[in-house]
Image (cartoon, grey):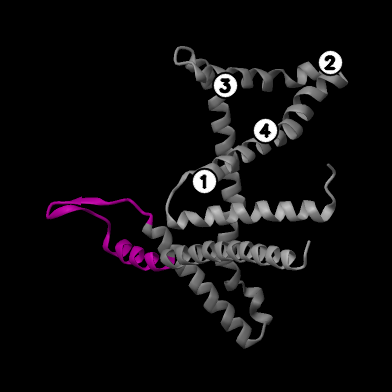
């Protein structure tokens, strides 16, 4: 039996509608069908990750170099292959220490990438955002633009300093009570809590917005399916 395109679209829409309604039914309580959909989703994602890893990492970086030139290919993949094989020893409680070399390498490379990314992507742009509004070259701008830039710069400067003060943990012990930070740091950290709350509120609002966009898209899918049924496809 050969299915034509309208029938395939109808079956695909029907499956999507059924899965959407099953997931929405989680609001009424957990049940077997919801868990089945979740397990299927996790399985699909795991299979997709295996396919992507095989096609983007294993074959081009491990198999193809050997096929193109066995001698230079083996020299190229010798160390990565050794580190990968050593990771399998982590599955054994007796020989798990052998895999610590590969794990230490992964952690070191990951931390180096994290520190480099945080420095280039967060720290330096933050410093630039704090300094640039007070640049003397902005004197050529109009009075209104220059004043607006200075106000924004002061807000960014205050937010940065007070937020960093909130994460200052240099408390000093006192004879009259528990260890506390210096009073002026406590004052700055109290202001920093406001900026942190605003930042977390914006992040939460973004998450809600993304969730509502996904919800609207699913509802639109249901409506489109109903319209398709009314058209007799």
First of labels 2, 1 by sequence position = 1
Determine the residue positioned at 83% across, 14% down.
71
Where residue 60 appears, as percent x and y from the top left, is 79, 29
Where residue 162 appears, as percent x and y from the top left, is 41, 64
First of labels 1, 3 by sequence position = 1
First of labels 1, 4 by sequence position = 1
Q: Is residue 197 left or right of residue 59?
A: left
Answer few, some or many: residues within 10 Å of disc 1's Cα (few below 14, many 20 plus, some between 14 and 19).
Answer: some
Q: Secondary structure at mark 4?
A: helix
Q: Is residue 188 magenta?
A: yes
Magenta-drawn segment: 167-195
Residue 70: image tag: 2
Q: Secondary structure at mark 1?
A: helix
Whether 136 is drawn above or below 119: the answer is below
First of labels 3, 2 by sequence position = 2
Q: CA distance from mark 3 to mark 4?
A: 18 Å
Determine the residue positioned at 67% across, 62% down.
221
- Report if the CB atoms under discs 3 and 2 are less than 8 Å apart: no
Q: CA distance from mark 1 to mark 3?
A: 37 Å
Image quadrant for the C terminus? bottom right
Determine the residue positioned at 51% across, 19% down.
91
Q: CA distance from mark 3 to mark 2?
A: 24 Å
- Report if the CB atoms under discs 3 and 4 are less than 8 Å apart: no
Q: Secondary structure at mark 3?
A: helix
Instruction: From the image, state whether disc 3 or disc 4 is nearer to you.
Output: 4
Q: Which residue is mark 4?
A: 50
- Report if the CB atoms under discs 1 and 3 are less than 8 Å apart: no
Q: CA distance from mark 4 to mark 2?
A: 25 Å
Q: Residue furthest right?
A: 68
Instruction: From the image, state whether disc 4 or disc 2 is nearer to you.
Output: 4
Q: Which residue is mark 3?
A: 87
First of labels 3, 4 by sequence position = 4
């Amino acid at each position: 039996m050969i299915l034509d395109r309208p029938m395939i679209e109808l079956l695909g829409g029907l499956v999507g509608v059924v899965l959407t309604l099953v997931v929405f039914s989680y609001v009424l309580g957990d049940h077997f069908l919801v868990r089945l959909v979740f397990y299927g989703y996790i399985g699909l994602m795991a299979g997709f990750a295996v396919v992507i890893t095989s096609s983007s990492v294993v074959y081009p970086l491990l198999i193809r170099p050997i096929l193109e030139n066995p001698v230079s290919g083996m020299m190229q993949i010798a160390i990565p292959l050794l580190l990968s094989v050593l990771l399998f020893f982590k599955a054994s409680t007796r020989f798990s220490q052998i895999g610590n070399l590969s794990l230490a390498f992964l952690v070191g490379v990951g931390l180096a990438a994290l520190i480099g990314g945080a420095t280039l992507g967060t720290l330096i742009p933050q410093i630039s955002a704090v300094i640039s509004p007070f640049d003397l070259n902005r004197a050529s701008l109009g009075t209104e633009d220059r004043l607006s830039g200075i106000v924004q710069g002061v807000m960014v400067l205050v937010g940065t300093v007070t937020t960093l003060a909130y994460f200052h943990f240099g408390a000093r012990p006192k004879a009259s009570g528990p260890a506390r930070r210096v009073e002026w740091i406590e004052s700055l950290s109290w202001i920093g809590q406001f900026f942190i709350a605003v930042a977390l509120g914006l992040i939460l609002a973004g998450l809600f917005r993304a969730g509502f966009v996904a919800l609207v898209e699913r509802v639109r899918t249901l409506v489109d399916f109903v319209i398709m049924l009314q058209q007799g496809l």
